[in-house]
Each structure stands twice: as C-alpha cells, then as structure tokens.
Amino acid sequence: MNISVESLFGSHVEELSIDHSLRLHGDLALRYPHGVHVVASVRRMARGVYVDGYVEGLEEETCARCLEAFSRQPSVRIEEPFSEDVPSNQALLPDVAPLVNRRVDLEDLVSQLLEVDEPMAPLCAPDCRGICPTCGASRNFVSCVCPPEQVDAPLAGLARLLSEQPLD
C-alpha cells in the first residue's frame, strides 16, 4: 500500500494521519493472520518526510523450547525518515529511506520493522521448561522421571574438571 505525501509539499497541509489496518504477504501473513494496525503521522522535513507512530498486531509463534504454539502482541515503534535525495537503488541504507514519487510504501516499511522485531528464539513464557530430550514430554505439563542427561564421553573430562572448580 502506497501513501501519497504530495500534499505535504504544498503550503496548506502540515501533517498526514495514518490509521489503517494492513494485511501482510508471504511469511508475515502466516505469522500475522489477522493483519496489523498502523497508527502514524507523516510530517514534512527538508527534501522529504518523517513517519512517526507504531504498528501492532497479534503474532502467531512457536516456542523455541517446548515447540508449543502461542501468540504475542508486539507494538513496534515507527521512526523513519524518507528523503528525495536518496536514490531508489540505495534503499538498503539504514539511516534514510528513499522517497520515490512522493509516496511511502507502507507495507514495505511495516514488513521491515516486523522482521527486525522478530525474536531470535521466541519463548511462550520466560520460565518455559522445554521438552525432555529423552522421552520428549513437555516439561511444562509433565514431570518426567527420566535420568539426567549423560555427558558425551569426549567431554566427560572437561565436565569433571568444571565440577571440581570452586564457585566464586
């Protein structure tokens, strides 16, 4: 979805308001099946515009420890300058995005922000206990009686050495 900011370059409009629900594509559509909501203001700056606001949605995730599905509700801040001085072939510059034909590609901006906000290893809860490597039971729901993991033979000497070291 492209937003025209042409009216900001006249003398009568100082700010544009965005309050829009947005459906995403690709992998983000799977993670945000109900889409996201964008609330922002767009103001003129020298040779461009500045977008300030936030994007929120309900993201469907899989826990990295227990592999259970869960939802999280991120709210990602939007603070993005767009400049007519930046050529479109240099769109990967981290400081300023190109303002091409005085239009802001809202879907592209939101997609980039959501990808950056994605946790490396999402957890359903900070105290998630994961799954037992022996029986595969979710330790969040079952107290398994499996023996503790055995240390791999090549590392047994190192494990013994570490257990003999006094803790500070």
Image: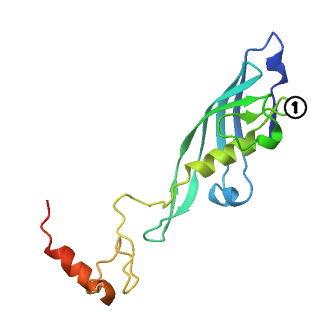
Q: Nearer the viewer, residue 30 or 98?
A: 98
Most distant residue in the right direction: 101
Residue for point 73% across, 14% down:
14
Quarter occupied by residue 165: bottom left
Residue 125: image location, x then y, percent = 39, 59
Q: Quadrant of the C terminus?
A: bottom left
Residue placed at 62% from the left, 51% from the top?
115
Residue at the bottom extreme of this rendering: 153
Location of residue 137 (image quadrant)? bottom left
Q: Residues within 10 Å of mark 1 (few under 14, many from 20)?
A: few
Q: How many marks?
A: 1
Circle 1: element type: loop
| Residue corresponding to mark 1 | 101
Decide if residue 42 is in sight here.
yes
Q: Quadrant of the N terminus?
A: top right
Q: Is residue 145 visible?
A: no
In this picture, residue 109 sits left or right of residue 61: right
**Could you say where residue 83 lies in the image, as x and y percent from the top left?**
76, 28
Tell me if residue 124 comes above or below residue 19 in the rendering: below
Is 86 on the left-hand or right-hand side of 168? right
Q: Position of residue 17 (x, y in %)?
A: 70, 25
Whole-percent x, y for residue 88 in the image = 82, 39
Q: Residue at x 44, y 61 (%)?
A: 124
Q: Amino acid at mark 1?
A: Asn
61 shown above or below 134:
above
